[in-house]
């Protein structure tokens, strides 16, 4: 469903509690940013795009292209990235928290 854009994120309050706890225990917090994370998610459905102006193939000006990965601006990109990260973490023996 291309309308499914939900991606779980930590609430600001949870982050503050986590940082306060780590400071209290004199722990070190590491962070990272994956700059192209939104370009790595696999799409669940087939998505076709037309050639953008200025990049039209002169030999095939009417061709459409099937995307293999998500693009910035897609509604489903957050969910695709979450699914990819979740699958990887589970493959590394992490587990999901089960809500009651």
Image (cartoon, helix red, strand yellow):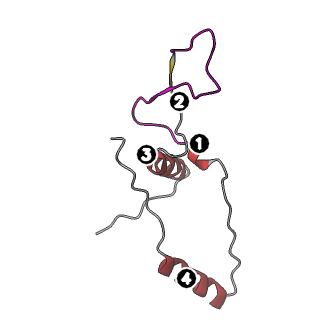
Question: Foreground residue, 65 or 22?
Answer: 65
Q: Marks 4 and 3: which is nearer the front? A: 3
Q: Is residue 46 left or right of residue 85?
A: left
Q: Disc 1 or 4, which lies upstream in sequence?
A: 4
Of helix, strand and loop, which one carries label 3?
Answer: loop
The residue carrying mark 2 is 68
Marks 2/3: CA–CA distance: 14 Å
In the displayed structure, does residue 60 sit left or right of residue 14?
right
Provide the residue span drawn in magenta.
Answer: 41-62
Q: Does residue 88 show up magenta in the picture? A: no
Q: Measuring 68% from the left and 81% from the top, which residue is drawn there?
A: 27
Q: Which mark is residue 89?
A: none
Most frequent secondary structure within the magenta stretch: loop
> Where does the C terminus fall, quadrant-wise?
bottom left
Q: Is residue 74 above or below residue 89?
A: above
Q: Is residue 22 left or right of residue 17?
A: right
Pinpoint residue 37: horizontal percent, then vertical percent: 60, 49
> Mark 3 or mark 1: which comes first in sequence?
1
Residue at the spot of label 4: 16
Q: Residues within 10 Å of mark 2 (few under 14, many from 20)?
A: some
Q: Position of residue 82 (x, y in %)?
A: 48, 52
Which residue was labeled with disc 1?
39
Disc 3 residue crowd, few under 14, some 14–19, many 20+, Cα 10 Å: many
Residue 22: percent from the left, percent from the top?
A: 63, 83
Is residue 49 highlighted in magenta?
A: yes
Q: Of the residues under marks 1 and 2, which one precedes in the sequence?
A: 1
Residue 76's disc is 3
Q: Quadrant of the N terminus?
A: top left
Residue 43 relative to residue 25: left or right: left
Q: Are marks 4 and 3 in contact (CB under 8 Å)?
A: no
* Earlier residue among tags 2 and 4: 4
Q: Earlier in the sequence, mark 4 or mark 3?
A: 4
């Amino acid at each position: 469903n291309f309308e499914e854009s939900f991606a779980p994120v930590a609430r600001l309050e949870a982050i503050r509690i986590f940082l306060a706890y780590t400071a209290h225990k004199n722990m070190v917090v590491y962070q990272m940013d994956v700059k192209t994370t939104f370009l790595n998610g696999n799409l669940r459905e087939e998505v076709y795009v037309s050639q953008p102006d200025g990049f039209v193939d002169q030999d095939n000006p009417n061709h459409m292209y099937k995307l293999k990965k998500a693009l910035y601006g897609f509604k489903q990109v957050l969910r695709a990235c979450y699914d990819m990260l979740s699958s990887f973490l589970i493959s590394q023996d992490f587990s999901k928290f089960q809500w009651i």
